[in-house]
Image (spheres, helix red, strand yellow):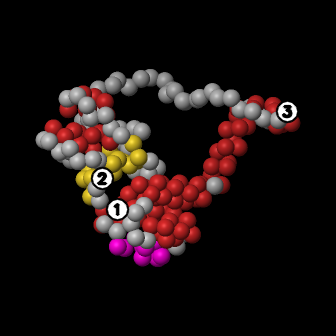
Amino acid sequence: MSAQSLIYAFAGHNLVAQGPISSVAARLKSALNHGDKELILLFDGSTGQQFDLDLSGSAEEVEKRYGKPAVQSGETEQDSSPKRRGRPKLGVVGREVTLLPRHWEWLDAQRGGASAALRRLIETARRENAGEDRIKSAQDAAQRFMYAMAGNLSGFEEAIRALYARESTRFEQETAGWPIDIRNCAREYAKPALN
């Protein structure tokens, strides 16, 4: 998770912080330093996954761990790392792929070799399935969040059914009675799947 990833922090049914991980970590560390011991649940803004922050040590150590909070409007931030000449690293990662012999024969016969052919196939599939992949990701993220925060609330099961059926009106009806922060966050996660 990058320092600029959006996260949600909940204390009970209340959203107590949201924003980049660096800003939320700084805010939670400050609250902890002022004696706030309330249990906080954190959620990744794109996947709905729960995670923990290590808030041990001083505020400076937390800042070093998660990055500086976002620069306030009107301020400027100098980039301390010098620009390097040349091409940036591509980030290629080698992993094992297991295929049948006929698949390897076909890949070896392709322009640019097996790796180039696999990259082209993957990019084509990503373009063709982008809409469905976006919907599935949104549904799964909303389901993860809702399971953790709304699993015991009235209308939970019906809301999940409406989410996967892509019935936005029914989803809104089933979540209408939920605590406002949970309702709004669940709707935000579900929005790409219901539009």
Q: Earlier in the sequence, mark 1 or mark 2?
A: 2
Residue for point 38% across, 57% down:
149
Does 106 sit left or right of 132 as displayed? right
The N terminus - image quarter = top left
Q: Which mark is residue 182?
A: 1
Regarding mark 1 in the picture, which secondary structure is present there? Answer: helix
User: Whole-percent x and y of residue 45?
Assistant: 40, 51
Pointer 1 and pointer 2: residues touching (CB < 8 Å)? Answer: yes
User: Whole-percent x and y of residue 140?
Assistant: 52, 55
Residue 23 in sight from this viewpoint: no
Q: Which mark is residue 101?
A: 3
Does 85 sit left or right of 34 as displayed? right
* Front residue of this view, candidates 103 and 29: 29
User: Whole-percent x and y of residue 119?
Assistant: 67, 38
The magenta segment is 169-177
Regarding mark 2 in the picture, which secondary structure is present there? Answer: strand
The amino acid sitting under disc 1 is Ile
Q: Which residue is mark 2?
A: 10
